[in-house]
Structures are given as C-alpha cells and as structure tokens.
Image: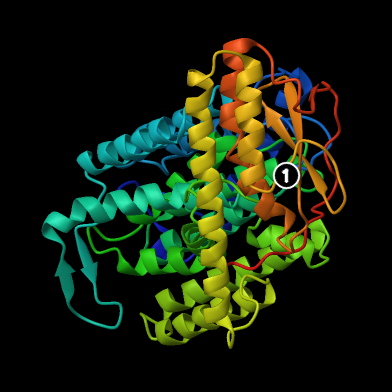
Amino acid sequence: MTDTPLPDILNWPSSGVRLTRLDAALFFGGAVLVSALAVFAVLKMNLGIAMDAPDARRKFHGKPIPRLGGAPIFLTLLLGAVAASFYGAVDWDRWLALAICNTLIFSVGFVDDLKPLGAKVKLVGQLGTAMILYAMGISIDMLSNPFGEGSIILGIWALPLTLMWLVAIPNIVNLIDGMDGLAGGFGMFICLTVAFIGHYQGQPDVAAVSLTMAGALGGFLVFNLPPAKIFLGDGGAYLIGFFIASVSLLSSNKGSVIGALLVIVIALGVPILDTAFAIIRRAIRGVPVFSADAEHIHHRLILLGYSKGRALVAMYTVCLLLSLAGISILLTKGLALPVTGAVLFLLAVVAARYLGYVRSFSRLRGQIRETLERRRRREYFRARGRVLEFEVERSGSVEEFGRVFEHALQRMDVTVMDGPRREGMDLDVGKSHTVRLFYPPDGMPKTEWQLRLDELVQSLESCLARWGSLPASIQSSTKAADAAPETALSSPATPLL
C-alpha cells in the first residue's frame, strides 16, 4: 500500500507500519463489502432460526425477521483483524485479551438469540466476560485530570468501575436496538469516533480495527435500514457495545482513561439519555427496570408524526453532533467540557418536554402524584394476579377457578363480557390462546391497562397448564398462526411519569 502516509502520529512504533489514507479507506470499505456479502448470504440461506416474530405492542414489522445480524458483523471483524495482523497493524500480544472477550460477549448474546437465556444468565455472562478482560490487564486504574496535571489512583475501585463500564455500554446499546437501523447506525458513528481517538492517541492499530468494525456495521445497515430485512439481535448489540467499551480502554494510556471515556460518554448521549428516561419511567411506575415497553425516544418521535426514516435521520444527526462534541473535549484537553455538559443538560430538559415524557414542568409535582396513584392501582392488580395463581392450586376444577377469577375481575372493574362504556383488550395466554377482557375507558391510556391486565396472564397460563383449558365463561380463542399485528402505535403518547 503506497499512498501518502498520514502524520507520523499514526506510525506503529513496534512495527514501523504506516497507516495511509488508502489503507484507512481499504479497512473501512473492505469491511463494508465483506459484511454486506455475509449478510446477503445469511438471508439467502433462510435458516429459519432466531426469528423475531411481530406482536401487537412493540414489534410492528409485518413478518418474522431473523435476529442473526451479529454473526456477519463478528465474522467481518474477525477477518479484518486477521488481515490487519498480516499487514503488521495488529499485535496479538496487545489484542488477544480483547479478541477473546469480544468473542465471549458475542457468544452470550448469540446463544440468547437462538434460545432465550434469561436476564440473570446474560448478566452473569456479561460480568464474567468483563472480569476476564480485567484479569488480562485491561482496566481503569487511574483517572487523569482532563483540565491539566494530576490524577486519581482508583485502588480497590478499579475493579467495580471497570466492570460497570464494560457491562453498562453493551446494555445501553441493546436497549436502543428497537428500531430499524438505530443501534447499527449509532454503533458505526461511535466506532468512527473510537477510530479518531486511536488516531489522536498515536495508536493506528486502534484506528484500523475500529474502522473495520465501523465498516462491518455499514455493510449490515444496507439490509437493516427501514424496512429491515435482518436484525442485530443480542449478539450484535452486545458485540457493538463491548467493542466500543473495551477498545476505548485500550486506546487510552495505561490506566489514565478519562479522556477516552468522556468522548465515548458524550458520543453515547442519546442512548444514555434514553436509558435514563427508561429507568426513571419504570422505577416511578413500579414496573421492572429491565421490562420492555414502547416508549423509547424513537417510539415517541413516531407518535409525534415522524416517519421511521425521519426519526432515524434526526437521531443520527444528534449522535453525529454529540460525537463531534466529545472529540472537541479531547482536542481542547477538557476546556470544552463545561460547554458540552451544559448542552447535554439542555438536551435532556428539551427532550423530556418535547417528547412528552413530562407534560409540564410547572405542574410536575401533580403529575408525580398522579403517576404514584397509577402505581398503587397497578400494584393492586399485581397482588390480585398473585392470589389468582394460588387459587389455581386450591381450586378443585376449572369451573371453580372460573368463578374465583370472575369475582376477582369484578373487584378490578374488569369483565369477561362486552357492555356499554367498555373497551376490549386481547391477552396472549401461552402459545395457543388469546383471552379478551373488557375494561372501562377511564381516561387512562391503553398502555396503562395493558400493564394492569398483564398481571392476570400468569394465573391463566397456570390454569391452562393444570387443566388443559380455560374456564368456559372467559372469552378465548386459539391463536391464528398468521395473525397480523397492529400496524401502528395507536395509543396516545403517555408522559414519563
């Protein structure tokens, strides 16, 4: 490769190899081509495994779509790293730990795509992978002063901070993977940012591998932009997040990582903001923090009238601007940090109001009281649902349980029969039945009633498991294999609180 070399800062001191502009273009462009061909091959094989089926609440694609996008990305990254090592760009003594641990984290997510492992098992896998990387010498031992001289030795805090960083970023990326092209596009922009950090820190191996990862995501996006033909899956999302987290540590001077971390945190501004909104929203509402819902930032934009394409462009633009803001902190040696912090705070405030998470800051206290009242109401439904699970064990027949179930519904102002001023909602019970219940239109959004009535599903599934049928008084039907889901988010936007 003979193109004019970039500045001397891009030389590999150990090998004398220079990363030219042509080389950089080949790392990125070659990865785009290999990844796109690999994704095309996966789609052509039509394996019929790890399929993501649509539903009527959060997943509105028209047919099942494979969640195998992580495999072509991982393959492209592996081939790119091997090619770079032959070129002399990658020293495996330096990269072996990252190669092992990125393979492990991808494996955890990919196995989950094939057969769900459960949140606890996945968390153990993530922590175990992070522990292995820490044990192999990749850690945050010291935080330098971004404004000048001096640093803080972390001591015993090095391990928890390193684990938090390596576990949080993959989960943040996975959390935003709810819209065609979103997580893949964000990952591509941030990998390009990591490549610039490698360039700036005089580590062109970091630049080369990060350009390869960015190119792999670019090739994947060819088939993932709306309407998506393939999804990342947990394997792809975990790989993107762990790659960003681990390589950003490698790109910093040993132990002194505050500069790189700040750049990545700022670049991840939108996913971090979305995660913060989700945690606050679910904690106040009294639902599990890791439960899924359809109220992420991209869902809100669509409810506000954005098309998928416009919403994607808007979020890409913000991600790009935040990446540039993060880089400005690195270039100014921390002088831009106060301005960037203020911009992030204003972005959070404006987003909370514009997206409808907060109806009015002047009436925020009343909104919190209203939300807490909803939470108490939902807790009542949860308690009733738990009691009904015990009633399945205590009842002598399905008919007896049916009478107990109807009495519980009366206490909750829910019926099994339609009537005046009633709205119906279908509940999926097991894999084969759908139950229709009717609730009063009391001004609460449909999503709120979904959360309440979902508390009854477990008792109905237990009934079905014990007697093989549901009470005759409950309106139920066998699921149609090709039932079409709703095609739009029909419920109005509900506030964060």
Residue under the point 54% across and 37% down: 385
Q: Residues within 10 Å of mark 1 (few under 14, many from 20)?
A: some
In the image, what residue type sits under mark 1? Answer: Arg
Question: Quick check: 278 above or below 477?
Answer: below
Q: Which residue is mark 1?
A: 57
Q: Is residue 1 visible?
A: no
List x then y, in percent, for residue 360.
Answer: 63, 82
Which residue occupies the foreground of this view, 447 or 348? 447
List x then y, in percent, for residue 325.
Answer: 52, 76
Q: Is residue 341 left or right of residue 481?
A: left
Which residue occupies the foreground of this view, 476 or 219? 476
List x then y, in percent, for residue 460.
Answer: 62, 26
Which residue occupies the foreground of this view, 296 or 258? 296
Question: Quick check: 249 above or below 243?
Answer: below
Q: Is residue 40 left or right of residue 154?
A: right
Residue under the point 63% across and 31% down: 405
Q: Is residue 400 left or right of residue 54?
A: left
Q: How is the image coloured?
A: rainbow
Q: Quadrant of the C terminus?
A: bottom right
Question: Quick check: 429 above or below 227?
Answer: above
